[in-house]
Image: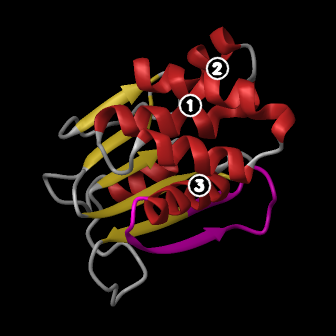
């Protein structure tokens, strides 16, 4: 696993971006890293812009936000547009191929989250699904740490469906 990561999870309220940032942060801490988590969201609980930024490093952190993201998850066109022209060539952008239709086509991977969620049978587990997709493309944290962090941050009654979604993301 790489030593330093700057990860942006961006979309709209209700997609579990804040929780996913917390889970990713906890997993990184379990792997022995220093972590900074910042979150921002609009005044609307659902539908407004929402974002988590996670900075992971083995070294001491001096700046809490993503100055130069290594990975951006964009679940809406607005999220994609906010970052697509402002990231380096090495930054991977994973975007929702149903929601993001105007892409730049550089270092990007489109994924149809809704189709995968329909196959899983639960639209509410999008955050577990996209965490799996992220780990499939970049070894940011260990799989075991991610699963443990998911279990620590979700009620026991929904562990199975979320782990199924996470596994589905890893396999896509």
Q: Earlier in the sequence, mark 3 or mark 1?
A: 3
| Residue found at the very far left of the displayed protein | 89
Label 3: state its secondary structure: helix
Q: CA distance from mark 3 to mark 2?
A: 20 Å
Above or below, comparing residue 107 to residue 136 in the picture: below
Above or below, comparing residue 61 to residue 36 in the picture: below
Residue toward you, 134 or 41: 134
Residue toward you, 50 or 4: 4
Q: Where does label 3 land, which residue?
A: 23
Asked if marks 2 and 1 touch (Cβ < 8 Å), the reply is yes
Coordinates of residue 81 in the picture (x, y in percent): 40, 52
Q: Kindly identify which numbered label has been placed on residue 129.
A: 1
Q: Locate residue 45: give its quadrant.
A: bottom right
Q: Kindly identify which numbered label has been placed on residue 117.
A: 2
Coordinates of residue 2 in the picture (x, y in percent): 22, 56
Specify start and end residues of the magenta stretch as a single range.
31-51
């Amino acid at each position: 696993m790489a030593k330093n990561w700057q990860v942006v999870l961006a979309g709209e309220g209700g997609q579990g971006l804040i929780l996913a940032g917390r889970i990713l942060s906890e997993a990184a801490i379990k792997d022995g890293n220093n972590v900074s988590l910042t979150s921002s969201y609009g005044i609307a609980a659902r539908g407004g812009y929402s974002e988590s930024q996670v900075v992971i490093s083995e070294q001491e952190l001096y700046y809490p936000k993503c100055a130069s993201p290594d990975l951006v998850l964009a679940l809406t066109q607005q999220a994609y547009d906010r970052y697509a022209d402002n990231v380096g060539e090495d930054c991977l952008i994973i975007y929702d191929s149903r929601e993001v239709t105007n892409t730049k086509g550089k270092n990007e991977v489109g994924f149809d989250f809704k189709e995968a969620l329909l196959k899983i049978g639960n639209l509410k587990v999008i955050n577990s699904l996209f965490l799996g997709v992220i780990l499939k493309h970049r070894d940011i944290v260990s799989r075991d740490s991610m699963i443990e962090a998911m279990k620590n941050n979700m009620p026991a009654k929904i562990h199975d469906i979320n782990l199924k979604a996470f596994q589905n993301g890893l396999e896509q």
